[in-house]
Image (cartoon, grey):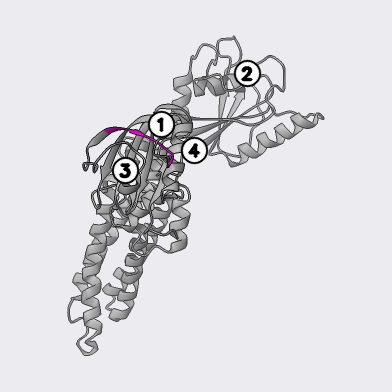
Amino acid sequence: MFSTNDTIVAIATPPGRGGIGVVRLSGPDAHAITLRLVTHNGSLRPRRATLTRIACTTDAAAEPIDQVVVTSFPRPHSYTGDDVVEVSAHGSPVILRAIVEAAIDRGARLAEPGEFTLRAFLNGRIDLMQAEAVADLIDAVTPLQARAAFDQLEGTLTAAIAGIDAALFDLVARLEASVDFPDEGYHFVEPGALGRAIDDLAGRTAALLAGARRGQLIRDGLQIAIVGRPNVGKSSLFNALAGAARAIVTDVPGTTRDLVTEVVDLDGLRVTLVDTAGLRETSERVESEGVERARRAAAVADLVLIVVDEDEAELVGTKHLVVQNKADLERPSRGVRVSAVTGAGLDDLRRAIIAALDVEPVRDRPALTNVRHIALVERAHVSLTRAAGAARRSMPEEFVLADLQDARAALEEISGRRASEALLEHIFARFCIGK
C-alpha cells in the first residue's frame, strides 16, 4: 500500500477544459507547500476561501500564471482526515498541470488512484462501505443510482450493519464467557433466549437481502441487445430509445457492422443498449464478423429485442421480446408495435421491457447494491441460521460460537475492519486520480 505520511497532490476535477479546475493537496506539508506557490502573505484561514495569485516556478521574480481561490481544511476536519488544501484555478489543463508539477517540485508526491479516499478510510473518516459509495456516486448515470450511492455514503448501510454487529458482539461475549466455565453449561445465556436473539439477527440480514437483486440492478445495470435481419429498423429503434442519433441509419442492408452501445435511464435502471449487425448469411468478411458479434452480444444480454417489420423473426435462445417496428406502415402486427420514426409505442415498449425483465418498480432505495456486500451478508445470514439451529438443539456453546464468529467476520469484512491489503488495493484501484 501507499505511504500515508507524505503529502500527495492531484487534479481533482475531470480531464479537459472547464470554467474551474481544482488541485487537491493532502498531508502534513499541504499548507506549507501551498504557501510557497501563492503570493498570499501569512497563513491560510481554516475553511475560508482566500483569493490570491499563483506562480509555479522557484524564481522569486516569476510572474503569476493565474488568479486562484485557495481553501485550507486542517486535520482532522477534512475529507482525508489529514491537512487538505484545495486550489481552485481556471480550468485550463496547462495551468492545472503546472500547479501539480510545482507542488511536486516543492515536496509533494503525485497521488495514486483513490488515494485521497483511502486516507479518509485509514484515518477513520469513513468506513469501506462509504468509500465504495464514493466511487458509485461518481459513476452514477441515473438519478436513482446517485440517490442509492449517496444513501450509502451518508451511512444507511453502515448503521444497519453496525446494529447487527453490535448485537452479535454481545452474544459472542456471553458465549465466550460460558466457554470459560465449561462445567456450568450455558451459564451466561439461556439456550432458548439465545436462539430467539439469533433468529432476530437472521431476520435482519434476510431483510437486507430481500432488496439485494433490485439493488444490484440499480448499481450494475442491465444489457439489452437489439437484433434482427438487415433493414428492419434496429438502428432507428436504438437511436429512438437512446434519444440521439448514435447509430448510422441508411436503406443499405448491412450498414451496421460493429456493436454500438449507449447507456440510458429506463425507469431508474441503468440500461446499456447494444445495436448489432443484421442477422443473415453472408460471405463478406467484415459483415460476417459483425454478425458473429451480434450473436455473442445476444447470448450474454439480459434481454434481447428482436426487431421485425413483417410477421417473421429469427428467434434467439435467450430471454427476448419481439418488437414490431415501422408500425406507421400497414403491415401484419406482432409483438410490441412501435415506430422509431414517429415515436409511437416507445412508452409501451419501455413498460414491456421492464415486465420482461421481471423487475419490480424501483421506488425505494435499497440498502444493498454492491455484489461484494451482498455475498458477505449472505454468508453472515447462513452462519446465523446455522447458529440458531445449534442453539435450539442445545448443542455445545463452541458450535454456536463458531458460527456467530463467522457471521461477525463477514460483517467486519463489509465495513473494512477485517479488510486485507489486497482487497483495499482492488477496491481503490477503480477510483480516479484525485479522489
The residue where tag 3 is placed is: 35
Q: What residue sits right under mark 2 in the picture?
A: 309
Q: Which residue is mark 4?
A: 222
- Total count of labels: 4
In reply to whether residue 56 is colored magenta, the answer given is: yes
Classify 10 Å Cα crowding around label 1: few (below 14), some (14-19), many (20 and above).
Answer: few
- In percent of the image, x 24 and y 77: which residue is there? 175
Circle 4 Cα neighbour tier, 10 Å, few/some/many (<14 / 14–19 / ≥20): some
Which quadrant would residue 297 be assigned to in this image? Answer: top right
Give the Cα distance between marks 1 and 3: 16 Å
Q: Which residue is mark 1?
A: 63
Q: CA distance from mark 2 to mark 1?
A: 68 Å
Q: Amino acid at mark 1?
A: Glu
Q: Secondary structure at mark 1?
A: loop
**Which sits in the foreground, 57 or 46?**
57
Residue occupying image coordinates x 29% and y 81%: 396
